[in-house]
Amino acid sequence: MKGMSIIVKKVSQLMAGLIFIYGIYIILHGHLTPGGGFAGGAIIAGAFILLILAFGSSALNLKKEIAGSSNTESVAILMVVVMALMALLFGSKIFFFNHLPKGEPGELLSAGVIPLYNIFIGIEVAGAILTIFLALVIFKEESSK
Amino acid sequence: MELTISIILGFMIIGAIYALHAKDLLSAVIAMGIVGYGLVICFLLLKAPDLAIVQIVVETITLVIMVAVVLDSTRKELEPSFDRRSLLNRIAGFIIFAGLFYFFLLAIENLDPLGMHSLGMADSYVNGAVELTGSVNLVNGVLFDFRAYDTLGEAVILYTAALGVLTLLRMKGKK
């Protein structure tokens, strides 16, 4: 896969950081505004896919990237299960129990464990979508050789 | 609002039918985009902005990947051939369509009107979720507190899909 022209490269370079920060905002404010882990993770994966499409596959080491993204999503899904098991240790005997203090509804630091679940689900979704995209790109590179 | 949604649904049906019959595969992919982005506007009109965010991002990513695939392989569609077998397929498809349409007409009589629900569980979700979960965004509160098993299932499905793609496509790389 070849890279695109210098205009596309420069604009995507400027925009990718903003898209990434918007994804983080969607995830962190998931318990306050519309959105959450799934939407924010898809947006973060979109920022990476934009950069890879603009700069071409020769600009970065794809094998290293796919190892990193698949490891990240594995650790994130493991952390979701560990968080659910933590509720068994602290507080009650219910899987997925919201054991942290709820706080005042509407504040950024509220709703107990829900923001933490949002963060880990967001990392998992971003890693999964990026892994699928990178696997397709590497398959095309190897089959065209 | 129902009139607007009906017009958008009409455009989506036209786009889907055009995508099936287009000779150029690139225009078929673009016509599939009409269906996805029309669904985004429908979600916004039905007051589901979080679904609209997910749908617009996923639609854009899949559209880009499909355009890359079409530009890399072929743009021509295969010529359809008419023989006894395709005639039989068409007759079977028409019979199934007519049967499904009949049952749809039967079912739509018992359906609640748009925006009115008759489930008792929805009331306790809407009225009591903020005190019980502490989350102002009701959808997220239900998703990660009352229905956390569903969310775990969805995340595991996505993880398994990524593992499946890796297993199928990276067999050569591991040797």
Image: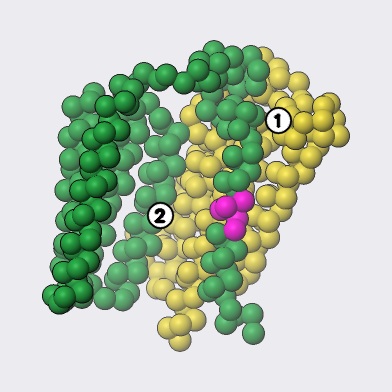
Chain colours: A yellow, B green
Q: x and y percent of residue A5 in the render? A: 34, 66
| Disc 1 secondary structure class | loop
CA gap between label 1 and label 2 equals: 31 Å
Query: For the image shown, how many numbered marks are present on the structure?
Result: 2
Amino acid at the residue labelled 2: Ile
User: Which stretch appears magenta?
Assistant: B156-160
Residue A66 percent across, percent down from the top left: 60, 66
The residue lying furthest to the left in this view is: B82
Whether residue A8 is visible to the viewer of this picture, yes or no, is: no
Instruction: Give the crowd class for mark 1: few <14, some 14-19, many >=20 residues within 10 Å.
Output: many
Q: Is residue B152 magenta?
A: no
Residue reaching furthest to the right: A89
Which image quadrant: the N terminus of chain A?
bottom left
Check residue B159 for magenta coloring: yes
Residue A11 left/right relative to B80: right
Residue plotted at (43% across, 36% down): B51
Task: Tell me the quarter of the picture where residue B72 sits.
Answer: bottom left
The answer to which of B97 and A42 lies nearer the viewer is B97
Is residue B159 toward the left or the right of residue A132 in the image?
right
Q: Chain of mark 1?
A: A
On residue A137, the disc is none
Residue picked out by circle 1:
A113
Answer above or below: position of A1 versus A105: below
Vertical comparison of B80 with B21: above or below: below
Q: Amino acid at mark 1?
A: Val
Between B98 and B39, the residue placed more toward the observer is B98
Q: Decide: is B171 above or below B166.
A: below
At x 60%, y 40%, the residue is: B151
Is the stretch drawn in magenta largely helix, strand or loop? helix
